Image (cartoon, rainbow, N blue to C red):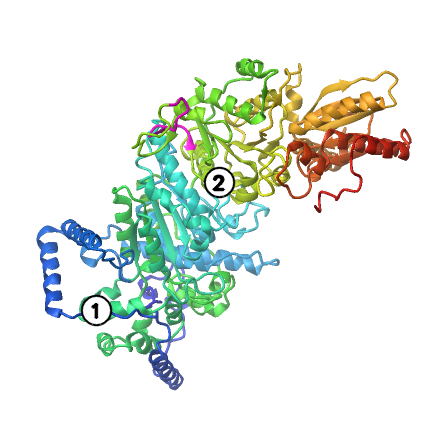
Amino acid sequence: MLIRGDGVHASRYSPAPGRTKSARFTRPVRDSNTREEKRNMSESETVAKAEVAQNVGELEQPVAAVDIDTAETEEWLASLDYVLKSKGADRVRFLIEQLRDRAAEEGIQSAQDTNTPYVNTIPVKDQPAFPGNRELERRIKSIVRWNAMAMVVRANRRPGGVGGHISTFASSATLYEIAFNHFFKGRGEDGYSGDTIYFQGHASPGMYSRAFLEGRLSEENLDNFRRELAPGGGLSSYPHPWLMPGFWEYPTVSMGLGPIMAIYQARFNEYLNDRGIKDTKGQKVWAFLGDGECDEPETLGAIGLASREKLDNLIFVINCNLQRLDGPVRGNGKIIQELESIFRGAGWNVIKVVWGDEWDQLLAKDTTGLLVKRMNEVVDGQYQKYTGMPGSYIREHFFGKYPELLKLVENYSDEKLEKIRRGGHDPEKVYAAYKQATESANGRPTVVLAKTVKGYGLGEAGEGRMIAHNQKKMNEEELLEFRTRFGIPISDEEVVKAPFYKPSANSQEIKYMQERRAALGGPVPSRPTQHPTMEVPTLEDYRKLITRLENKSCSTTFAVVQTLVALCRDKKIGKYMVPIVPDESRTFGMEGMFKQFGIYAHAGQLYEPVDSAILQSYKEAQDGQILEEGITEAGSMSSFNAAGTAYSAHGINMIPFFIYYSMFGFQRIGDLIWAAADMRAKGFLVGGTAGRTTLNGEGLQHQDGHSLLNAIAFPTVRAYDPAFAYEVIVIIMEGLKRMYQDGEECIYYLMSENEEYEHPPMPAGCEDGIIKGMYKFRSQEVKDAKARVQLFGSGAILNSVLKAQEILAEKYSIASDAWSVTSYTQLRREAGDCDRWNMLHPTETPRKSYLEEQLDGVEGPFISASDYVRALGEQLTPWIPGDYYVLGTDGMGRSETRESLRRHFEVDAESIVIATLSRLSKTGLFTAAEVADAIKDLGFDAEKQNPYFA
């Protein structure tokens, strides 16, 4: 209708077999001449006139410039018309740019030109002929609408009310169906040649409904929407590849992630092409999102990169239904105009699809320009009000502002005014926009801004209402209205059950759908479940690197980078390595990689770097291997996700290696890492400069003592805190084998620290322990020892443990075993899994975890220390065979030396000694007085504030 109507007529359908026409479409006939309706119309007109008089629902208009020489103005306009007609649009653009530049030279600032009038970007004269069968496509879309609605309604009738969203797909059905029938490229014969599509999460019922008609999902699947554990299998609420690995590719329902991942996916496709790894030129990247989603910083935060990198393979489709959960997106403004300005300013092609074809005649008839003026001045909140108001109100409020506009619609009935469509519901307007977007080759990404109605077609159940987003239920009358409006051949008796409807396999609708998808390369969304693997280098191949780092004073970050450099040179997998770093290469000692491998830039390097004469100069190249993303962990993680799913998207095992400032990983971009897990991404995450006390000087905002705790929640993330170079290399080589040779879908996460210390030779036979989570590194024997204790250490704090081991032996005659715990989380997962199995299999021989095997018969107590919060080590408490005490870095970081920080957080050698003596005192081996004396002798302030609260 301005807004509401869809032009669907039930009479176009013939009766379904076995049904009489009267049984199919009974609907109360509206008598537009009833006394009640006349009274309501009169009231609406009165209200509308009063609101117009007060400028209700209008933007505050700037003071218009006065034309002091109308004749001169006409001459200029006539000249422009002449040039346009005789020499074309390009010449007009050139002259306008020349005038603007000349004015700027004289100090005259021109008005902003990032907005165009509130009309369709593509004029009627440039609109291409529609190639499809409009009638068949309308019928298919109506059936898809019905089944999507029925799916949600049925799900909510069951006990538990599992939810679901109707209104998002209701508003975007045309946007999707035109793409399905004419633009979305399937995977093709090789399985990896299709478009990449980020579907709007809340529109998932529509995708399921179409897949049902295509024969890819069963009625039982639809009936089990949001009941994924039901017999026969169900459907996930939103796009979740983890839950539906053969269907969905990308999770998008966490607002803002779909758009930013789409941008970096489009850039990664160009990366593959520019590096000669795969020809991706025929593949588009589509992102479907809502206008309300644009409030999320991730949605718009990277659009500058898309234009800077000339990503004309990228298309955003923003469903501008003007409404979010609680109310209008921009009630007092115009979201389409706002987004147009933002995207045009960022260098995108912008295609606005605001009005349906019914408006074309009105615009053509309007010689005053007042119709466009009125379109421009009405705010979105008012347009939403039109959705729920009668035609009499629309006539008086929208057209009644200017008598000339009332004249334009004097032959239009109120009902016709209600049914004039918005552009996003007009198939031919949407087709024209997509055609221009897909054929654009000007080096710019494209955004389609399509104006729609939230809950389109739901009538009183939610069309254009503030409650539309949460609309889940429909009563019998609403179901009848929906059935009739979209011409679904279901009887009145059956419609209350909200049954699914599927035409026969030989019907015109099903044949048409199948033909169109076959012509475009197959169904979407689609994700293969069998993936290519690759041979990777072995640990033996990298023994020389381990030997080279023996007895060397360096940091674990240095070991990580040296391994990465070696892998990038590796003959088997080198070209598939994807180093990713967010502007911290020099922090991590990676600058030497710039010249060796190049920093990827689609345009190459157009300048001579200031440091070009030195060995480690900054080098950008079109075939560069390093993704140096600038200061954006979110962008870097999006690149990781694109590279990490290249095996399923492109059939190529790319190996992302994302190294970042540890504090700004799980804490800042945990949502994108969760998405990576959902989309089954593979690769390496490296938290550089990790450890609450190891990163000295930087202070509270930078010192990471809890990312390993965060990582516990991510089932596909295998988190490690290696202490020595050989541990780093063993873990990385194991990760390569597991992910790329064995095909496991997981992520290896390593903490790497910047403290330099000597790295010992690799003990024989420790490889298995490094991977599983712990191994005995060193035993300290003492003649006639008073006791024996077990000391757990990891990362840089293992050095504190080793020093404590010496103090315990020398001062207190205590023997000890020092264990390198590379992964508390891997140990806990395996132990917990064994416990669960034993609980559920009480009559079978109990399983024993690796942790329990290692500690079987080992004498305690057990003291754990790490550079992370205590909860990390406390995970192991149920499986430790004796007294267990954990030290950690709970509390806020601060700027200080490592020595001072470790004393503050009580993870230095002396703190470990005190904790050990304290636990031994509980067994009677030491007295309380002896422990108190030790605290003084070790120079520890027993009255200092608890670091957790400091």
Q: Amino acid at mark 1?
A: Gly
Q: In which quadrant of the rendered view does residue 764 lie?
A: top right
Q: Which residue is mark 2?
A: 633
- Of residues 864 and 217, which is closer to you in this image? 864
From where the camera sits, is residue 330 visible?
Answer: yes
Q: Are marks 1 and 2 in contact (CB under 8 Å)?
A: no
Q: Residue at x 54, y 13 (%)?
A: 544
Q: Which residue is mark 1?
A: 369
Which is nearer the N-term, disc 1 or disc 2? 1
Which of labels 1 and 2 is toward the front?
Answer: 2
How far apart, in angstroms, are the residues tagged by discs 1 and 2?
A: 48 Å
Image position of 912 (left or right of 606)? right
Above or below for 85 versus 246: below
Image position of 179 (left or right of 825)? left
Report x, y in % for residue 946. 74, 43
**Main SS of the magenta segment?**
loop
Report x, y in % for residue 237. 52, 50
The quadrant in which the N terminus is found is bottom left
Report x, y in % for residue 12. 31, 63
Image position of 866 (left or right of 152)? right
From where the camera sits, is residue 525 visible?
Answer: no
Q: Residue at x 33, y 76 (%)?
A: 397
Magenta span: 614-627
